[in-house]
Amino acid sequence: MQEKCPRISSAEVADFMLRLNRPVSAPELTVLLQKAYPGLLVEKNDIYIRLKGFYRSAQADCVLDDDVRPRTFHLKAISSHYFKFRNGRRIDLSTTVIKETLLGEEKEKATLRAMAFGRELFHRILAKRSLLATL
């Protein structure tokens, strides 16, 4: 009896597309992924569903070109929050080009830095504006 090989995950598809960094159609991507991941099950319909998911997600920056057939998708960025690993097979996102999102204290520090930068920028604009008003 033939062993069932695991299906390719969305994280692997996204990582491959980010490394490719160009528009790609579902059939073309399927062929490329079958060559890159020979031990995984890669099907065209499954890939197309994942590409449409990237396009519709608010956590991904994906461009769809509907003017050509087959449609092409260009994944430019995706958040690590998009992925939900199930069925025991996890991908180490640190080995991919997928951006890790900040959590906890790091997220709070980044927010405070952004707010401080915004305040500094606002005060510079006000100072420049008051300087121009006196002239």
Image (cartoon, rainbow, N blue to C red):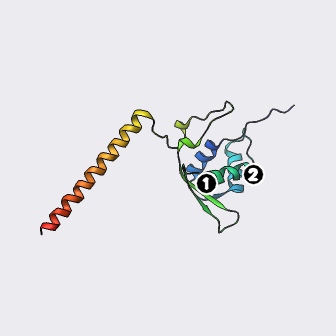
User: Relative to 95, is 77 above or below?
Assistant: below
The amino acid at mark 2 is Asn
Q: Earlier in the sequence, mark 1 or mark 2?
A: 2
User: Relative to 90, is 11 above or below?
Assistant: below
- Quarter of the image holding residue 92? top right
Q: Which residue is labeled 1 in the image? A: 56
How far apart marks 1 and 2 lie (CA) works out to 17 Å
**Residue 52 place in picture, x, y as percent:** 65, 54
Residue lying furthest right:
1
- Within 10 Å of disc 2 (Cα), the crowding (few <14, some 14-19, many 20+) is few
Q: Quadrant of the C terminus?
A: bottom left
- State the SS at label 2: helix
User: Relative to 135, is 42 above or below?
Assistant: above
How many numbered markers are drawn?
2
- Quarter of the image holding residue 128? bottom left
Please name the residue shown 54% across and 41% down the image.
Answer: 81
- State the SS at label 1: helix
Residue lying furthest left:
135
User: Relative to 47, is 89 above or below?
Assistant: above
**Residue 86 place in picture, x, y as percent:** 66, 34
Please name the residue shown 62% across and 33% down the image.
Answer: 90
The amino acid at mark 1 is Arg
Q: Which residue is labeled 2 in the image? A: 45
Camera-near label (1 vs 2) is 1
**Residue 6 place in picture, x, y as percent:** 73, 36
Foreground: 69 or 61? 61
Please name the residue shown 50% across and 43% down the image.
Answer: 99
Q: Taking 38 as reference, is 107 left or right?
A: left
